Image (cartoon, rainbow, N blue to C red):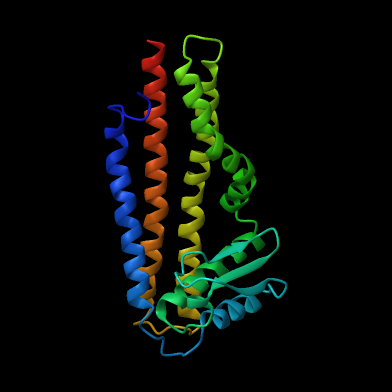
Amino acid sequence: MFFFDPTYILILPAILFAMWAQARVQNTFHSYSQVRAKSGITGAEVARDILTKSGLNDVRVERIPGNSGLQDHYDPRSRVLRLSQQVYASSSLAALGVAAHEAGHAIQHHENYVPLAIRSSLVPIASFGSRLAFPLFLVGFLFSGTSLSWLMTAGIWLFIAAVIFSVVTLPVEYDASRRALILLSQGGYLTQNEVPHAKKVLNAAGITYLAATTVALTQLLRLLILRGSRRD
């Protein structure tokens, strides 16, 4: 059956990796959200100061509900940097790292950073593909040998778009973290002894994107194997 087949052994290690990565980023963020930066500056103040120094006075910094520190993001369409309460109003090492990371995305957008532009252009098709890929593949799989079998291939191509989006996200996120650490150090928001701790938070977050990409790639391999076996 489609939902219970031996190909699941392919994605099990990737899923376990993703679960470990998620637990690690949550634990790391929680640990360093308890450690206050010596500068006493908040995440919102760091983000605003970085944006101002980068000539991005038109980018707003907004507070959003939530305290996980994982829903913070920069919206290039509305040019708004949104920070959760635990980042916006906190002066912790974790908060400053996340705020600077999101400011890094705004700078990427301002500089027309190519991977970010590619990712942004892929958002509509990736969103569409992630929703419809598996339903289409399943219909084609169940009705293989009929006029509907082509839906397996259509589902795979839609899922490929989502995989490409995930792959392109990696350089975007790692570059934003690289920029963040430089900005935090050179701007004097963190001391040289504090920067490595902020790096741990950003590295942990980066691993979650790597894990997500690994899961997507193994899922794609699984779909290809299933299509091949159905054709046989």
Compared to 180, does 228 lie above or below? above
> Residue 98 at what x, y percent from top left?
47, 71
Q: Is residue 150 rendered to the left or right of residue 26?
A: right
Q: How many marks?
A: 0
Q: Which quadrant of the view contains residue 109?
A: bottom right
**The N terminus lies in which quarter of the figure?**
top left
The answer to whether residue 181 is visible is: yes
In depth, the one of 155 and 136 nearer the eye is 136
Q: Is residue 48 rendered to the left or right of residue 164?
A: right
> Residue 28 at what x, y percent from top left?
33, 69
> Residue 148 at what x, y percent from top left?
55, 15
Picture residue at 33% right of the left edge, 56% below the top:
21
In depth, the one of 203 and 36 nearer the eye is 36
Extreme residue toward the right, this view:
58
In depth, the one of 44 and 146 nearer the eye is 146
Q: Which quadrant of the view contains residue 128?
A: top right
**The C terminus lies in which quarter of the figure?**
top left
Picture residue at 66% right of the left edge, 63% below the top:
110
> Residue 184 at what x, y percent from top left?
48, 77
Compared to 176, does 148 lie above or below? above
Q: Which quadrant of the view contains residue 80?
A: bottom right
Picture residue at 38% right of the left edge, 30% below the top:
221
The answer to whether residue 196 is visible is: no
